[in-house]
């Protein structure tokens, strides 16, 4: 299955259809409907709708088709209605004019100072009344379904680009871990030498009895054991490298599997960052410190991109 990004955009608009048989025998273009869907990253699925009042009743159906195919992301759906007349302004019918005159008389009966309707206002109102939006819900749903498919395609293409980038960073992290492996024996040798030096210092201190500053052999032994334990803890970076490699394997498996992997990837990126931090804090070698810093830079780049994966 594909890895989907949460970032995408799709839009579409239906064309008006000609219809004959008006009272004036003038062919009119029916209103068209448009849909726009935008999505960005979010921890959960957050839907918002910007619909005209005439299409507000379609919101539950729109929400249903969106929740069926989207799992995460902040998604905004906007729809609009456009009434087109290719032949110019439509001439109102006698029935429409009679209705407007009746409405005007009723208004002026209560508001005698109200201005009478102008020709432009009559044309505008008659055109608006002619638009029947009752039949637009079906084409709206059809258009929204097509726009949603286009959105999913756009999110899949972006997801593929994110996958390629993440796999590239995984390869670089594996190379850094490979470079760190040979440094572990060197660190062990360095720490062993430091341990021997401190052990000799402890023995020399115990031999200072003649000067009046003697240290009991038991105390020297305990001091040496304490130093040895501290050294062993400090040089134990092999465990961090092993865990880091296991996280890389799991991330690659999830990317190849696809589907809803964003939250699991986000958790694994946090674990990678933890191991790289521990590696740097335990390092007493300049080269290993550099490797730790390079790892954290790559992991941060991955973290930013994983935030966009569904």
Image (cartoon, helix red, strand yellow):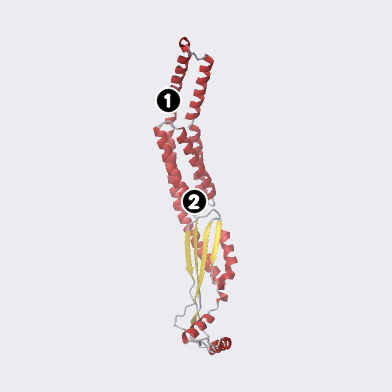
Q: Residue at x 43, y 22 (%)?
A: 193
Name the image quarter holding residue 280.
Answer: top left
The vertical placement of 137 against 105, above or below, is above
Q: Does residue 189 sit above or below 123 in this rendering?
A: above
SS assignment at label 2: loop
Q: Are marks 1 and 2 in contact (CB under 8 Å)?
A: no
- Which is nearer the eye, 145 or 63? 63
- Asked if residue 104 is positioned above or below residue 83 in the image, the reply reads below
Front residue of 281/132: it is: 281
- Other residues around mark 2 within 10 Å, as few (<14) / some (14–19) / many (≥20): some
Residue at (42, 39) in percent of width and height: 293
Which residue is identified by label 1? 190
Q: Is disc 1 surrounded by few (<14), some (14 to 19) or many (20+) residues within 10 Å? A: some
Using residue 97 as the reference point, say whether residue 181 is left or right of it: left
Q: Which mark is residue 160?
A: none
Q: Secondary structure at mark 1?
A: helix
Q: Is residue 68 above or below residue 211?
A: below
Residue most extreme to the front: 212
**N-terminal label among 1 and 2:** 1
Disc 1 from disc 2: Cα separation: 41 Å
Q: Which residue is mark 2?
A: 307
Q: Image quadrant of residue 99?
A: bottom right
């Amino acid at each position: 299955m594909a890895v989907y990004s949460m970032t995408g955009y799709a839009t579409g608009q239906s064309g008006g259809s000609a219809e004959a048989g008006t009272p004036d025998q003038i062919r009119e273009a029916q209103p068209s409907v448009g849909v726009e869907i935008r999505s960005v990253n979010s921890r959960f699925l957050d839907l918002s709708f910007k619909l005209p009042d005439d299409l507000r009743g379609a919101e539950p159906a729109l929400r249903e088709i969106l929740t069926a195919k989207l799992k995460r992301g902040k998604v905004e759906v906007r729809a609009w209605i456009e009434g087109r007349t290719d032949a110019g302004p439509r001439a109102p019918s006698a029935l429409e004019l009679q209705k407007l005159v009746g409405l005007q008389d009723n208004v002026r009966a209560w508001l005698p100072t109200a201005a009478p309707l102008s020709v432009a206002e009559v044309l505008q109102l008659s055109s608006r009344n002619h638009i029947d939006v009752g039949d637009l819900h079906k084409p709206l749903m059809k258009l929204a379904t097509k726009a949603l498919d286009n959105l999913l395609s756009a999110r899949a293409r972006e997801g593929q680009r994110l996958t390629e980038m993440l796999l590239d960073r995984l390869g670089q992290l594996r190379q850094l871990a490979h470079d760190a492996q040979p440094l572990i024996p060197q660190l062990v040798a360095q720490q062993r030498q430091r341990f021997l030096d401190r052990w000799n210092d402890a023995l020399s201190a115990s031999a200072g009895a003649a000067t009046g500053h003697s240290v009991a052999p038991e105390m020297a032994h305990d001091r040496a054991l304490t130093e040895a334990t501290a050294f062993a803890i400090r040089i134990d970076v092999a465990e961090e490298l092993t865990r880091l490699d296991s996280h890389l394997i799991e991330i690659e498996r999830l990317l190849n599997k696809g589907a809803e992997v964003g939250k699991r990837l986000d958790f694994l990126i946090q674990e990678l960052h933890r191991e790289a931090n521990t590696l740097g804090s335990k390092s007493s070698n300049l080269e290993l410190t550099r490797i730790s810093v390079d790892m954290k830079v790559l992991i941060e780049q991955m973290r930013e991109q994983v935030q966009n994966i569904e």
